[in-house]
Amino acid sequence: MRCVALRHVAFEDLGLFEPVLKQRGYEVEYVQPGTDVLSRQDWLDADLVVVLGGPVGVDDLGLYPWLGDEIVRIRQRLESQRPLLGLCLGAQLMAAALGARVAPLPNKEITWGRVSLTGAGAGSPLRHLDGLDVLHWHGDAFDLPQGAELLASTSMTPNQAFSVGPAALALQFHPEVAASRMEPWLIGHTTELRAASVDICSLRFSSARQDTKAQALAAGWLFDEWLDDLKKSSDRFGWS
């Protein structure tokens, strides 16, 4: 089986999700948007596509025209009902592909904190995050797309996660990020952090205080259960 992961910056990878994929026999292929070209068929043939995070936004289409192509391919993937996971920027691009508005927040949400699960979220693999902090790192937020089911919220960002059908999941937050691997984020996003008046030392300290074992277990259980759910529904969208 083949997982294609669109990685916009090198340190924002599959993180805690990658070992789960490899244990299940997936070959992971990282693709760099804007440089590597994936054909429409490549997008449709992959057993799983994951669109990862990054420092650009949906409203940066004028600066990064390839974002438009990415949105088109995401829309085609959604229409095919093939498994698709979007994380942070990936979730925003999914929302845009579904016709929802994506716009800047008054203030960036960059912190460790819990999400409030909806009834649907509590009945989904996200239940493994209940009571645990996850990494929030975004300056944009999306409206809930028409036909999508809301799974999680925070006070600053009411739409934190949604699903569309049995095969598409969008997460505004970052359950895949290991708290013990935060330093590349603090280095790579230093300009953003300073512009947002985020105290880098405080963020490093709060990362070090996380229960990394519980976090890793929860992320693995979440992702493993979601993949199990996909497999159970495979006859509905032609995936095995």
Image (cartoon, rainbow, N blue to C red):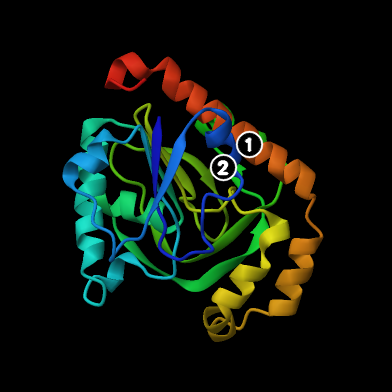
Q: Is residue 34 above or below residue 239?
A: below
Q: Is residue 42 in sight in this rendering?
A: yes
Q: Nearer the viewer, residue 237 or 20?
A: 20
Circle 2: residue type: Phe
Which dot marks residue 17?
2
Q: Which part of the image, by quadrant, shows the N terminus?
A: top left
Please tell me whether residue 99 is drawn above or below residue 218 in the rendered image. below
Q: Residue at the location (25% across, 56% down)?
A: 70
* Helix, strand or loop status at disc 1: helix
Q: Work out how far the residue at label 2 is from the one at label 1, CA to CA, in angstroms.
A: 6 Å
Does the image show residue 130?
no
Image quarter in which the C terminus is found:
top left
Nearer to the camera, 10 or 102: 10
Residue 96 lies, in percent from the top left, at 28, 54
Q: Do the CB atoms of the residues marked 2 and 1 lie less than 8 Å apart?
A: yes
Label annotation for residue 127: none
Above or below, comparing residue 163 to residue 106 in the picture: above
**Disc 2 packing (10 Å; few <14; some 14–19; many ≥20):** many
Q: How many marks?
A: 2
Query: What kind of residue is marked 1?
Result: Gly
Q: Which mark is residue 220?
A: 1
- Element type at mark 2: helix
Tell me where residue 83 sits by quadrant. Answer: top left
9, above or below 179, in the image: below
Q: How far across and how far down the image is residue 199, in percent?
A: 69, 80
Residue at figure coordinates x 17%, y 44% from the top left: 40
Disc nearer the start of the sequence (2/1)? 2
Q: Is residue 35 left or right of residue 232?
A: left
Left or right of 26? Residue 40 is left
